[in-house]
Image: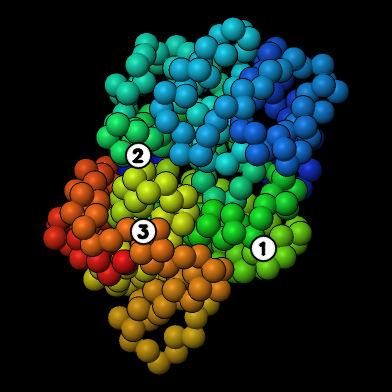
Amino acid sequence: MSRITLFRTTPRIVMGPGAIGQLAQEALGLKAEKVLFVTDKGIIKAGLLSRAQDVLERSKIKYAVFDSVEPDPRYEITEACVERIRSEEADLVIGFGGGSPIDIAKASAIMTTNEGPIAKYFGVELVPKPGLPTLIVPTTAGTGSEVTPIVILSDEVEKLKKGIVSRHLFPAVALLDPELTLGLPANITASTGIDALIHAIEAYTSVNATGMSDIFSLRAMELLYDNIRTAYANGNNLEARSAMLEGSLLAGIAFANAGVTAVHAFAYPIGAEFHIPHGIANTLMLSHVMRFNLLGNVSKFADIAETFGLFTEGLDELRIAELSIEAIERLAKDLRVPTHLAEFGITEKDIPALAEGVMKATRLLANNPRVMTLEDAKDIYKAAL
Ligand SMILES: [Fe+2]
């Protein structure tokens, strides 16, 4: 061990088929008397929230529902959510859904005790006080936000996705039930699942990776890579869904500690400006950024190929490392995820502004295994057109 390291995660993680049945028990463990669910209308329409509501009703725990979360939520939505927490006098916030409701739940919980506007907390460890406790129930295997101290919100004016990183953003409980993910459509399974895989790849190759974070990254890659095709091809396969949810959890634990790197830095500007869903934006950039980053840590990229179970016998390390990129390209093709920026109307003239956006993501670039210049960023976008 050559440096001082830190490892932290959500203190309670409840996981497994039917885990939603323990929601009331977990809420009572946090001394909840009135709960506010933070979710979106799609989750309600899919009949997922009613399963959680039933559990609370059986235990006579009062609740209200805030369902105005939109995809790529604007940070202003937290204001409406905080108002609702106050008017309902809720003492526990349950984030229920994909990354957007979860992040709004986490952000709103800290804004109940910290003075606004929320914009002043964008950055690392700027939030002074803990907020209300949060209990997080993810319904996609992707975000990992149930175990991270991070929320990502959209700034519509600056056309940027911005992050708040704070120890006070760790949820009190993560409750993961793979049965809630059985009905996810194949395209969402693909984009969220690849996002989770990217979290593991980026955490593993981050300059801030540690011995502990590597354990989580490697197991996450194994679970996600081995199961994503099955989960995509047959959404009802509970075993594959369970492995995906566990994989995204472990990837979240890994990147909460090691950070993500340039793939996310490239995905945020195209996500914010062209409204490309996060997992797809990441996948569009993944192989191009990996190709650039490979020289920064050849042996770790070779480990990724080995973890994927690729045939590597007799090959040298550099070639094995390259195989990890080929495997990712094949995976994106198999899962029919778009692979060119042009498919979203992005052209060469958009690149300078997008590349500037990458360079603003200093928090992420600081983790990148290879130093990135503005010219590099332009070249990488060009390669992805
Ligand atoms: Fe992500």
Question: Residue 121: x percent and y percent?
Answer: 32, 24
- Mark 2 or 1: in front is 2
For badge 1, the amino acid type reads Ala
Residue 308 visible at all: no
Question: SS at mark 3?
Answer: loop
Q: What type is the residue that disc 2 sits on?
A: Lys
Residue type, numbered disc 3: Gly
Q: Is residue 103 above or below residue 59?
A: below
Q: Position of residue 130 (x, y in %)?
A: 45, 18
> In the drawing, does residue 198 fall left or right of residue 384?
right
Residue 93, percent from left and from top = 59, 22
At x 40%, y 92%, the residue is: 314
First of labels 3, 1 by sequence position: 1
Give the Cα separation between the discs numbered 2 and 1. 29 Å
Pick whichever of labels 3 and 2 is earlier in the sequence: 2
**Mark sitting earlier along the chain (2/1):** 2
Identify the element where label 1 is drawn: helix
Left or right: residue 67 compared with residue 254: right
**Residue 380 sits in which quadrant?**
bottom left
Would you identify the image quadrant in which residue 113 lies?
A: top left
Residue projecting furthest to the right: 58
Q: According to the image, label 3 marks what residue?
A: 345
In-front residue for pair 83/208 = 83
Front residue of 135/237: it is: 237
* Category of crowding for the residue at label 1, using alpha-carbon neighbours closer than 10 angstroms: few (below 14), some (14–19), many (at least 20): many
